Image (cartoon, rainbow, N blue to C red):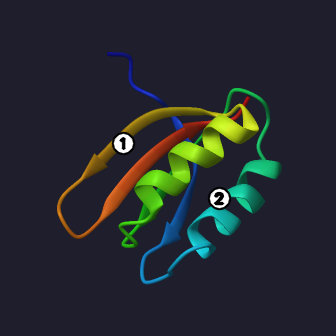
Amino acid sequence: MPVVEITQVVDARGLSCPMPIVKTAQACKGLPSGAALELVATDAGSIKDVAAWCRATGNELVEQTSDGAEYRFVIRRK
């Protein structure tokens, strides 16, 4: 699997819905097409929220991992 170069990191730890998505959307607007950002969140709801947001916006959910308490997402801007 190719390594994705992260352009920006969004730290949404401690924030609950909808703030992780709001912060991700704001950060994404400033990125060029094809750039990737990493979102780190502690809200379990962000798993469904990020997937739904990516489908709705056309951005690509490249990677999604969890270590139990934290959720990490890599999203590529369309």
Q: Position of residue 42 (x, y in %)?
A: 36, 72
For the residues labelled 1 and 2, say whether their Cβ atoms are less than 8 Å apart. Answer: no
Crowding near the residue tagged with mark 1, few <14, some 14–19, many ≥20 C-alpha atoms within 10 Å: some
Q: Quadrant of residue 43?
A: bottom left
Question: Could one spot residue 30 in this view of the protein?
Answer: no
Measure how far apart labels 1 and 2 are at the Cα level: 14 Å
Q: Is residue 64 left or right of residue 38?
A: left
Q: Nearer the viewer, residue 23 or 55?
A: 55
The residue at 73%/49% (across/down) is 28
Q: Is residue 20 above or below residue 61?
A: below
Q: Position of residue 56 (x, y in %)?
A: 71, 40
Mark linked to residue 64: 1
Q: Position of residue 2 (x, y in %)?
A: 38, 17
Crowding near the residue tagged with mark 2, few <14, some 14–19, many ≥20 C-alpha atoms within 10 Å: many
Identify the residue position indicated by label 2 in the image.
Answer: 24
The residue at 73%/29% (across/down) is 78
Give the total of numbered labels: 2
Of labels 1 and 2, earlier in sequence is: 2
The residue at 46%/52% (across/down) is 48
Residue kind at label 2, given as amino acid type:
Thr
Q: Is residue 2 left or right of residue 6?
A: left
> Where, quadrant-wise, is the N terminus in this rendering?
top left
Q: Quadrant of residue 10?
A: bottom right
Q: Is residue 71 above or below residue 43?
A: above
Question: Could one spot residue 23 in this view of the protein?
Answer: yes
Q: Nearer the viewer, residue 5 or 58?
A: 58
User: Please, which residue is most extreme toward the left here?
Assistant: 68
Q: Position of residue 24 (x, y in %)?
A: 65, 59
Residue kind at label 1, given as amino acid type:
Gln
Q: Secondary structure at mark 1?
A: strand
